[in-house]
Amino acid sequence: MDTRSIGMFDSGVGGLTVLKEVIEECAGEKVIYLGDTKSFPYGNKTKESIIQLCKNAIDFLIKKDVKAIIIACGTATSQALEEMQKCYNIPIIGIIDSTVEYIENKGYKNIGVMATRGTIRSNGWKNKIDKKIKNANVINKECPLLAPMAEEGWTENEIAKLVVAEYLKGLKNIQCLILGCTHYPLFKEVIEEQIGDSVDVINTGEILAKSLNKILKEKNITNNKQTTKEYEIYLTDMETNFINVASKLLKDDSIGDRIKLAEY
């Protein structure tokens, strides 16, 4: 048994979609979440900048004595995961590998990917899919407006519906649609309503949580003592709409009491 926490980070509220799934799937685990709101958004930054931001976040979480780290960000996963795994002697996982394994097991060949500009341009999803799935047809779609809209809480209004409709143009004849940024599951209902029941709209957080649970068991570092859901949240900048979006997503009206300023 290992009572240390799971560490997790993202540029803002997006990673909370992963946190939500982790605290449901891994109910015995404590989680420390870092929202790098001061550096939001990651999607338009260079690879070098993202690598440095990831190092800053991971160093902060390691000082909190975490036992594993989740990069709860599509952009950071696609551009920095492998580098981070080389730099640190701690389990570090991102949102891509487990999702591609899920798609492979489902037998999907026609695959849509919605992600940030940085993620799409890095070809992070396409390269992993092509490596694992023979004759896959991948349609990439840059969706730079969705993450900022999610940070504002604009995920269900008419503006959200119009923007999603525009981004879904061209995503035809696909079997599944990867929400390749962790902010995008906040738009899942709107996307499903517009794309139809025939397409599997994939929330990467759900799949990642199951993968994390498996890894913890394999490494024998699960926490069987904890029985209640417990998490802490740190932000690098408090002047955001984070609390409003987070309280709605996690159904926690007292979430403001959990939030502290991360200084590093």
Image (cartoon, rainbow, N blue to C red):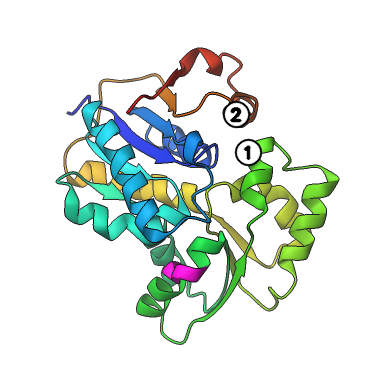
What is the tally of numbered marks visible in this picture? 2
In the rendering, which numbered label is found on residue 50? none
In front here: 108 or 42?
42
In the rendering, which numbered label is found on residue 240? 2
Image coordinates of residue 234 in percent, x first then y, are 42, 25
Asked if residue 256 is positioned above or below residue 212 in the image, the reply reads above
Image coordinates of residue 241 in percent, x first then y, are 63, 29
Residue 47 placement: quadrant? bottom left
The amino acid at mark 1 is Glu
Q: Residue at x 33, y 38 (%)?
A: 57
Q: Main secondary structure of the magenta part?
A: helix
Mark 1, residue position: 151
Q: Residue at x 71, y 48 (%)?
A: 189
Q: Residue at x 32, y 34 (%)?
A: 7
Residues tagged 2 and 1 counted as in contact (Cβ below 8 A): yes
Element carrying mark 1: helix
What stretch of residues is rendered in magenta? Answer: 121-125
Residue 65 placement: quadrant? top left
| Residue 227 appears left or right of 239 | left
Image coordinates of residue 223 in percent, x first then y, are 25, 28
Q: Residues within 10 Å of mark 1 (few under 14, many from 20)?
A: many
